[in-house]
Image: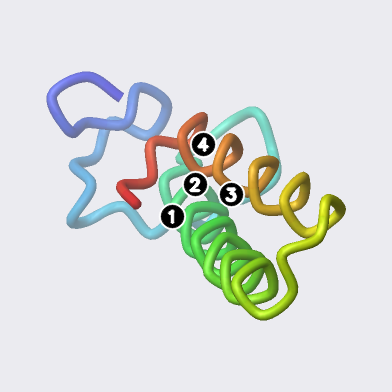
Amino acid sequence: MINNMCLNCSKYRTSCSGETDNTFTGCVYKTIQTDKRQALQVYKDTKAAWHADPSRDNWIAFCDAKITCRRLGVII
């Protein structure tokens, strides 16, 4: 994306339908937004699990979820 425009389908984010998800041709904006929402939900779930039971395994899962969010650009 450059200036909110998909380089493959030449549409702005607001009008991009994301119909070609999971392929290398076409707009992937919708897929990225779905991935971000899922990553944020996993982060929230692992954070709650870690607060409920502060074990080493929960801490590792929480850190992994946080790393995934940061890699996707999710603001947490």
In the picture of the structure, the residue carrying the numbered disc 3 is 20
Viewer-side residue, 41 vs 27: 41
Measured as percent of width and height from the top left, residue 53 is found at 74, 74
Q: Which of the labelled discs sits on residue 23, or is there none?
A: none
At label 1, the amino acid type is Gln
The Cα atoms of the two marked residues, 4 and 1, are separated by 15 Å
State the separation of the CA atoms marked 2 and 1: 4 Å
Q: Label 4 belongs to which residue? A: 26
* Residues at circles 2 and 1 in contact by the CB criterion of under 8 Å: yes
Q: Amino acid at mark 3?
A: Thr
Badge 2 amino acid: Ile
Helix, strand or loop for disc 2: helix
Q: Tell me the number on the disc at residue 32.
A: 2
Q: CA distance from mark 2 to mark 3?
A: 12 Å
Q: Secondary structure at mark 1?
A: helix
| Quarter that holds the N terminus | top left
Tags 2 and 3 touching, CB below 8 Å = no
Which of marks 4 and 3 precedes in the sequence?
3
